[in-house]
Amino acid sequence: MRIARFDNNRVGIVQDDGIHDMTGALEQLPAHRYPFPRHDALIANLDIFENATTTRVVKLARAELLSPVANPGKIMAAPVNYTKHLEEALADKGIHHGNLIGEIHKVGIFLKATTDEGSVGWAEITDSHGSPRGLAGIIDDLAPLVIGRDPRPVEAVYWDLYRATRQSPGSVIAKALAGIENALLDLKARALGVPVYELFGGPTRDRIPMYWSHCGTTRARAWEVTRTPKLGSYDDVAALGREVVEHGYSAFKTNVVVPGDEPKVLMPGFNEGGGTLQAAEIADALVRLLEAFRAGTEGAARPIVDLNFNLEPEGCVRVARALEPFDLL
C-alpha cells in the first residue's frame, strides 16, 4: 500500500495512475492528549484507513504531492536529496508547523564505513557545541590512512591514526578517532554476526536504572517545539515533579531553570561567562527550583543537577553546599 499526502493536506492511497482520497478516514483516528505517543497515529491505525470509503479519485499526474510525513520527528540519517527535502520543509508551514528545524549538517555528523564488498559500519560523531565543520574536515584528512585497509584489525588502525595526530591530542581529534574506531567496530561486529559488546567480553548488565533528563529544562526553553506545558510558575514545577513519579522514575536531572511568563535557563558558561560571579544567584535559583520539585515528588524521586560549564571550582563548591539538603544523586 502506497500512501500519499497531496494537494491541500489530503491523504490517499495510490493505485495505478490515481490517488484514492481517504482524507475522511482521518476523523476516525483516536484523539491523543499529553503525553503524546511516539508513534504515528495514521500508521498505527491503518486498518481504519484501509477499510474507509474513498470519496474521489484524483489523477496522480494532476496532484501536487507533498512531503509524506506532515510533522517529521528525529532524522537519524540524511538521504541523498536531503538538501531539497530541507528546503521544502523550511518553505512549507504545513510541514514544519512553526517547529524548530535543525539542519543535520550543523548538528549531526554520521560516519559510514563501507567495504569493497558492500558491508557497512556506522558511527555518530556529532559536535553540535564546537566545530562540526572542523570535525568533518578531520575525518576527510584521516580518510586516506584508512581507505583501502583491512578494517578488521581495529586497534592497529586506531594507533596509526593516533600517531598521525599526536601533536594535537584530545578535543575534536579524539572525537574523530573515536568515530572511525566505532564505525570499524560496528563493521566488524556485523561481519561476525554479534553485537558490538561481544567484542569487549560481553555485557556487564542487562538492565540499567533510568532518570528523566532535562526535566524542566525543555519546558522552559522549548515547550512550544515539544508541545508540552510551559513552566510558567513554581506550581508548574511541582506538577512536573508529580509527573516524574507518575511515570515511574526514581530520579530526574535538571539545570538552572527559572520558571515564569518567559521561563529561562541560566547558562552564563555558554554566553557571557563569569558564572562563578553569579554563583549566589545560581544557588538561589536552584534551591527554589528543587524545593518546588520536592513538593511534587514528595521525596519519591531524587534530583540530579547539571551545572554544565557554568561555574569554576569555587562556584561549584558554593552551589554544592547550598544544595546539600536536597540529597542529590
Image (tube, grey):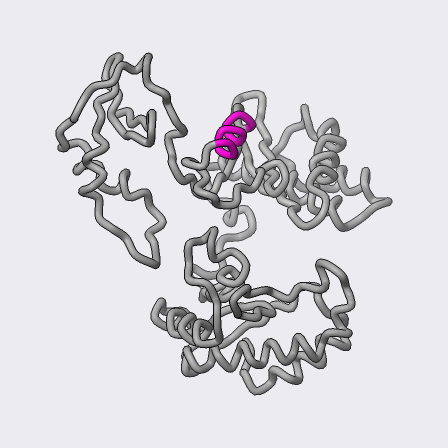
Residue 218, compared with residue 69, is above or below; it is: below
Q: Is residue 186 left or right of residue 133?
A: left
Displayed quadrant of residue 132: top right
Q: Is residue 86 magenta?
A: yes
Name the residue: 24% across, 50% down.
31
Nearest the eye: 64 or 198: 64
Nearest the eye: 277 or 195: 277
The residue stretch that appears in magenta: 83-91
Residue 184, compared with residue 239, is above or below; it is: above
Residue 239, compared with residue 126, is above or below; it is: below
Q: Is residue 51 magenta?
A: no
Q: Residue furthest bottom?
A: 325
Q: Is residue 119 visible?
A: no
Name the residue: 49% across, 29% down.
88
Name the residue: 20% across, 19% down.
57
Q: Where's the C terminus, which quadrant?
A: bottom right
Q: Is residue 238 visible?
A: yes
Residue 263, compared with residue 131, is above or below; it is: below
List x then y, in percent, for residue 130: 71, 48
List x then y, in percent, for residue 247: 36, 67
List x then y, in percent, for residue 1: 25, 25
Please tell me whether the stretch drawn in magenta is mainly helix, strand or loop: helix
Displayed quadrant of residue 179: top right
Q: Is residue 322 left or right of residue 170?
A: left
Nearest the eye: 133 or 23: 23
List x then y, in percent, for residue 34: 33, 58
Nearest the eye: 188 or 122: 122
